[in-house]
Image (cartoon, rainbow, N blue to C red):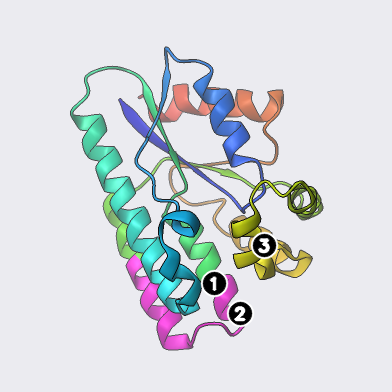
């Protein structure tokens, strides 16, 4: 078994992409280790931005390590699909720094942790990075539907055009990283790229 990580801005369609992969139960399985920070960790609402970033990056490092261990202990050719990776923390941390929500020393500390984590893990990662307008449109529709009220209230400042555009630009900077596949949609074209990449790169 080999792990792949699905990254991208919130609202980009990661969940839909993952669900499409999981329809092929013969070849894909979901990593079920997950913490819902909004609903399972009430204290997150009173944390500083730096504390949130630090918590999430350590969580993503641990999630990646346990996924790798799980794969080593499973002798089959399936793909373990993991929601989010350390690359997401790199992007969110940079945006928060640009917006002045964390200091230079805090940002440098977070970046060092992320860089060291990536050296250890070298994750095979799919970055789903659609046009920012598509992402914002989806987030606005989700807010109207009220399906994630607690999350939308807590993270409202992250759902703006400014924030999403900044995230998009930071994800673009990761396109040349080792073991990274970039797609801009979760439709047939994007899915085919994922399947080909897995066959050619991940399952070697």
Quarter occupied by residue 185: top right
> Mark 2–mark 1 contact, CB under 8 Å?
yes
Using the image, determine if residue 159 lies above or below residue 20.
Answer: below
**Residue 2 shows in this picture:** yes
Quarter occupied by residue 97: bottom right
- Quadrant in which the C terminus appears: top left
Say which element carries label 1.
Answer: helix
Say which element carries label 2.
Answer: helix
Give residue 179's position: percent from left, percent from top.
44, 42
**Residue drawn at x 76%, y 46% as measured from the top left:** 145
Label annotation for residue 94:
1
Give residue 124's position: percent from left, percent from top.
42, 40
Q: Is residue 45 left or right of residue 109?
A: right
Q: CA distance from mark 2 to mark 3?
A: 12 Å
Using the image, determine if residue 156 lies above or below residue 72.
Answer: below
Residue to which mark 2 is pinned: 98
Q: How many marks?
A: 3
Give residue 22's position: percent from left, percent from top.
50, 23
Q: Dot 2, crowdedness within 10 Å: few (<14), some or many (≥20)?
A: some
Residue to which mark 3 is pinned: 169
**Residue 118 shows in this picture:** no
Residues rendered magenta in the picture: 94-113
Q: CA distance from mark 3 to mark 1?
A: 11 Å
Q: Can residue 106 be found in the magenta stretch?
A: yes
């Amino acid at each position: 078994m080999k792990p792949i990580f699905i990254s991208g801005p919130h609202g980009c369609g990661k969940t839909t992409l993952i669900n499409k992969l999981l329809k092929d139960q013969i070849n894909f399985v979901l990593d079920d280790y997950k913490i819902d920070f909004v609903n399972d960790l009430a204290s997150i609402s009173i944390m500083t931005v730096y504390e949130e970033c630090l918590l999430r990056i350590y969580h993503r490092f641990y999630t990646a390590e346990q996924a790798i261990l799980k794969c080593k202990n499973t002798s089959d050719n399936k793909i373990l699909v993991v929601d989010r990776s350390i690359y997401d923390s790199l992007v969110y941390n940079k945006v928060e720094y640009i917006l002045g929500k964390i200091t230079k020393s805090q940002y440098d500390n977070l970046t060092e942790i992320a860089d060291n984590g990536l050296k250890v893990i070298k994750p095979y990662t799919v970055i789903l990075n659609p046009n920012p307008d598509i992402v914002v449109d989806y987030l606005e529709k989700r807010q109207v539907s009220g399906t994630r009220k607690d999350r939308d209230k807590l993270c409202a400042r992250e759902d703006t055009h400014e924030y999403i555009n900044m995230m998009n630009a930071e994800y673009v900077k990761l396109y040349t990283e080792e073991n990274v596949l970039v797609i801009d949609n979760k439709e047939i074209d994007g899915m085919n790229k994922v399947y080909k990449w897995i066959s050619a790169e991940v399952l070697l």
